[in-house]
Amino acid sequence: MMIDKLLGMIFPGELHCLCCGSILGSRRRYPICDDCIGKFGWVTENTCRICGKPLAKVNEKRGICYDCSESERTFDKGYTCALYGLYERALIMDLKYRDKSYIARALGLIMADRVLAEDEGGAGPAWDFVTWVPVSKKRLDQRGYDQAELLARFFAEALSEGRGRSGLDAPALKGLLERAKDTAPMKDLGIAERRENVKNAFKMKRNAVVKEKSVLVIDDVFTTGATLEACARALKEAGAAGVDVLTFASGGDHRGRSEDREE
Ligand SMILES: [Zn+2]
Ligand SMILES: [Zn+2]
């Protein structure tokens, strides 16, 4: 079983487009064909200066999205690669529910390129460690892997192989955060209820490790940010000096319509 998963991780992604399955004729950075890659909503400019999601037109001037203006933010800065649209969602669903763990390798690479792009001139972000939002024990047993862990591991690997400064090279550390309680599904909850739902949902296991360090927390999708916010709070309470967050995709900037993390 485990071996199947490992083989699945190395094997199919490189030959076929992860999105449409067409054969990839030439070498390319990501195993995604040109047609499909053009359909992603890549996030580049006009992003929220706190969480990094693309801003609604009306919020561009003040530079902060609805969710950040209505929530307390403990993390320092957020980064995301793409808007959570049809193509992004299909990849995340494949990764989480269709046993296609190998997708994490491509997404981890895309996420590394996203933060390396911030590094022009050598003044970009730097972290001591990378960690991730852990899935619940129940999900881990069902799925056999933690998709956020895979993203973080491939991300850290790509980062260290990347063209970045040495300061960008941050190892993925397992077991910094753990779930302190099971949380209800977020789907039908409003923003305040979501915050309440995940409040104290995570606890730190290795406080001494993060003291005065800067940490990057990785997850697949950023929606209201309530889950990552809860993780950032646990890390800061344990003495972390800085906490940034990075996701592959982010929901749009609108009030009360965000989809949420589907475990
Ligand atoms: Zn394709
Ligand atoms: Zn924001």
Image: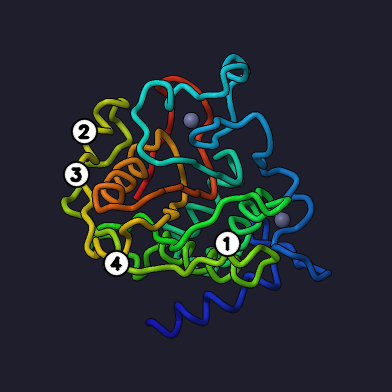
Q: Quadrant of the N terminus?
A: bottom left
Give the residue type at disc 2: Glu
Q: Residue furthest bottom?
A: 3
| Separation of residues labelled 2 and 3 (CA atoms) | 9 Å
* Mark 2 touches mark 1? (CB < 8 Å): no
Q: Position of residue 70 (x, y in %)?
A: 37, 21
The residue shown at (30%, 47%) is: 236
Q: Residue at x 60, y 32 (%)?
A: 47
Q: CA distance from mark 3 to mark 1?
A: 30 Å
Q: What amino acid is labelled 1 in the image? A: Leu
Q: Earlier in the sequence, mark 3 or mark 4?
A: 4
- Which of the two discs, 1 and 4, sits closer to the camera? 1
In the picture, the disc for residue 196 is 2
x and y, in percent, of residue 99 in the image = 45, 66
Give the mark nearer the N terminus: 2 vs 4.
4
Q: Which residue in the structure is indicated by mark 3?
A: 200
Residue identifier under label 1: 168
Q: Residues within 10 Å of mark 3 (few under 14, many from 20)?
A: some
User: Considering the numbered disc 1 on the image, is that residue within a helix, a strand or a loop?
Assistant: helix
